[in-house]
Structures are given as C-alpha cells and as structure tokens.
Amino acid sequence: MLSRVADSLYWINRYVERAENISRFLEVSEAMALDCPPGSAEPWVPLIDASGDRELFDKLFPEGRPADVVRFLVNEPDNPSSIVNCIAFARENARQIREVITTEMWEQINDLYLILQESEGFWQLPGQEQLNEIRKGCQLFYGITDATLSRDLSWQFSKLGRLVERADKTSRILDVKYYLLLPSTEEVGGVLDELQWISLLRSAGAYQMFRQSQQQAIAPKAVAAFLLLDPIFPRSVRYCLEGLNKSLKVIRGNPVPGPPDDLECLAGLMLANWSYVRIDELVNRGLHEAIDQFQGDLNRLHELINERYFVLPTPSPATVAVPPTTPLPSASTSSLACAPA
C-alpha cells in the first residue's frame, strides 16, 4: 500500500471520529446547561480544554461566552478542529483515494460535507437537531465502512486512525472532569457533581453501559475505571489500546528477527500499563498526572506511526542526482500532533 493512501485512510477516520466526539460533547453540554442549578458554572468552556484548543479559543473569543464555544467547535473557519473543518478535511482525503475506498463510503462523507457546506435549511435547525444529524452522519460512515470495506490494510489503517482519536478524546474529557471542571473539593458529592459525572458518561456514549456494569450509585473511581480500564467497552482507553496493538501487528506482518522497534515497544508498553494497573493506584498517585503521561505517550505513538508508515525517508545526497520534487500541500491538520496526508 502507498504511504499516501495509508495516511489518508488514517486521517479520514481520525477526522470523522473527532467530529462525532465534538458533536456529542456539545449535545450533552446543552442538555446539562438546562439541568444545572441556578448560579452554577456553565458547562461550556471546559469543552475547549477537552479539545486541547484553549490558546486558539482565547485568541479568537476573549469573552468566552457559550455561543462562542459552540461557534468555535462547530463552524469556526479558523479552528482546524471544528466539526465543519474536520468533515471537510476528511472529505478531501477521501477524494484523493477514491479508487481505494468504497463508493458507499465516498457518498456518505460527501453527503455530510455538502450538508454542512451548502444546506441553508440545515443551519436553520435548532442546535440540538444539528448536532444530532452530524453525530448520526458520522456514525453512519462508521457503519458503512465496517459493512463494505475489506479487512485488508485499508481496514487496518482506518481502524488505527479511529482508535487513536477515540482514546485521545476519552482521556481528555475524563481529565477535564477530574482536574479542571471541579477544582474545589467543596462541590464534590453535591447535586452539580452528580450531574457532571452523568454528563461525562453521556459525553463518552457510556452512560447505559456503565449502568449495566455498575449497578450502584455513580462514584468517581467507578466512572474513571470504566472509561480507562474496561476491557469490553469500545470507547475505553484499554479497549482502544488493544485494538491499536492488533492492527499494528497485522500491518507489520511477519516480525523481523531482532529486538522490537520503537513503535512496537511503545504500543506494547502502553497496553501493558493500562491493562494491569488498578484504579486505586492511578488515583493515589494522581489521575491527572497519569492521563497527562498517557497523552504524551499517545502523541509519541502517533509520531512513530507517521514516521514508520506515512513519511518517506529522505535519501542521502550521495544517492540523489537531482533534488526531490516539492510535495503538494497537506490536507491533514490535528490538534494532537499533525501529520501530512
């Protein structure tokens, strides 16, 4: 498989996953704003921290109003991680590899792109309906991909991009709750605290599955353990890492004799760390610090994937007769660690 094809497949799925996550975050925040007690902090600005774009948001919208948060995350042209831009980037990557993806995949991503770019009626719908349609459109793309794409390298790189982005967003939204959303211990255990834990689970699409697995009152440790360490919930960090390792093994093929390379070592260590650690240990040593370390490892994992599979090695001057052609501008940007598509 060509590097540019693998790169595009990886980024198509990262962008669609990112757009779907942001739409769900906003849906839950709008519902939570109606339930919060009078005078409580509005659940909007923490979404910027969860997306990792605080500096850009403060620059574009110094006042930080709820409407500014929605605009920034949904259709702000200067935010490369806004929903509209994510779908546009995904569609551009898909256009470049039309011969690789299925017709049904192309039609779905193109339809979603056209709705966001050209449909005046769509932008006249209530905010909740807009977000619901975006989320369903992204989920429909997942379903079409799962149902029509052969389980070859195209599938593995698609799965790789989806799981990297999913692990990133799950860990970020949990970190916001534990470290940024409630810095004061006075509010812990109150009505607002319980609403925020419920909203956190809903933001990750985990509320019903958590209730089925934990038939007791919502407790912070139980929520953190479910989102980080549950082996069968598809949005938990551990589940994503297991999927990442399986895909990397298939992509790598027959192992080369000798010690494992940096990518294989890091992926294996991350899976081991998050498969055998206990939630009490994570909380005691600092959950924020553990998640911060995970974010750094995930960024490094992305860089190693990029170096290993997407970026062609630069030939030495002694073996090149003429300078290489300047590559075309990239369609890919990312708040996590950008890589060219």
Image (tube, rainbow, N blue to C red):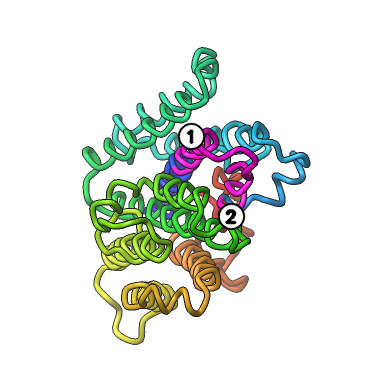
Identify the amino acid type marked 2. Answer: Leu
Residue 109 on image: x %, y %: 40, 31
Q: Which residue is mark 1?
A: 31
Amino acid residing under circle 1: Ala
Q: Tell whether position 170 is magenta.
A: no
Q: Classify residue 107 as left or right of residue 7.
A: left
Identify the main secondary structure in magenta: helix
x and y, in percent, of residue 228 in the image: 38, 64
Residue drawn at x 42%, y 37% is 94
For residue 211, side relative to residue 205 (left or right): left
Residue 181 image label? 2
Q: Position of residue 123 (x, y in %)?
A: 54, 19
Q: Is residue 171 above or below residue 59?
A: below
Q: Residues within 10 Å of mark 1 (few under 14, many from 20)?
A: few
Q: Residue at x 23, y 38 (%)?
A: 148
Residue nearer the viewer, 68 or 271: 68
Numbered range of the magenta stretch = 21-50
**Circle 2 residues within 10 Å: few <14, some 14–19, many ≥20:** some
Give the residue drawn at x 58%, y 72%: 316
The answer to whether residue 8 is left or right of residue 46 is left
Residue found at the far bottom of this picture: 258
Please tell me whether mark 2 sits on a helix, a strand or a loop.
helix
Q: How far is the residue under mark 1 from the one under mark 2? A: 17 Å
- 136 vs 164, nearest the viewer: 136
Between residues 188 and 177, which one lies in front from this camera angle?
Answer: 188
> Of marks 1 and 2, which one's residue comes earlier in the chain?
1
| Residue 47: percent from left, percent from top | 57, 46
